[in-house]
Image: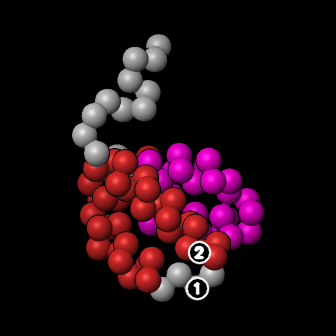
Amino acid sequence: MRRLQGWSRYKLGQLTEAHLREAAAHMFRASPGRDFWADARALRTATSESRKARRFHQILDEEYLRALTPGPSPTAGTG
């Protein structure tokens, strides 16, 4: 989800919340994605211009916090 390219697709209804969560989780697996959101999250959440934008940023933040939480990955034990 190269930085926040998913916003346009989410805003237009082309990206579901489930897909957004999956893309955000993928982005936050690597330190560049986590570093980006650590720097951008306060400004992004404070300046969300609509309810949909607030929800988009809330989902990103939830997945960011989940990525920071130690423990087994959601897919651990499958397969």
Magenta span? 1-25
Compared to residue 40, the image places residue 79 above or below, namely above
- For disc 2, the neighbor class at 10 Å (few under 14, some 14 to 19, many from 20) is some
- What residue would you read off at disc 2? 53
Q: How far across and how far down the image is residue 45, in percent?
A: 45, 77
Residue at x 31% of width, y 59% of height: 34
Q: Amino acid at mark 2?
A: Ala
SS class, disc 1: loop
Residue at x 47% of width, y 60% of height: 60
Quarter residue 17 falls in: bottom right
- For disc 1, the neighbor class at 10 Å (few under 14, some 14 to 19, many from 20) is few
Q: How far across and how far down the image is residue 68, in percent?
A: 28, 50
- Residue 2 seen: no
Instruction: Name the image colouring.
Output: secondary structure
Residue at x 55% of width, y 73% of height: 54
User: Are dots 1 and 2 in contact, CB under 8 Å?
Assistant: yes
- What residue would you read off at disc 1? 49
- Residue 19 seen: yes
Magenta stretch mostly in which secondary structure? helix
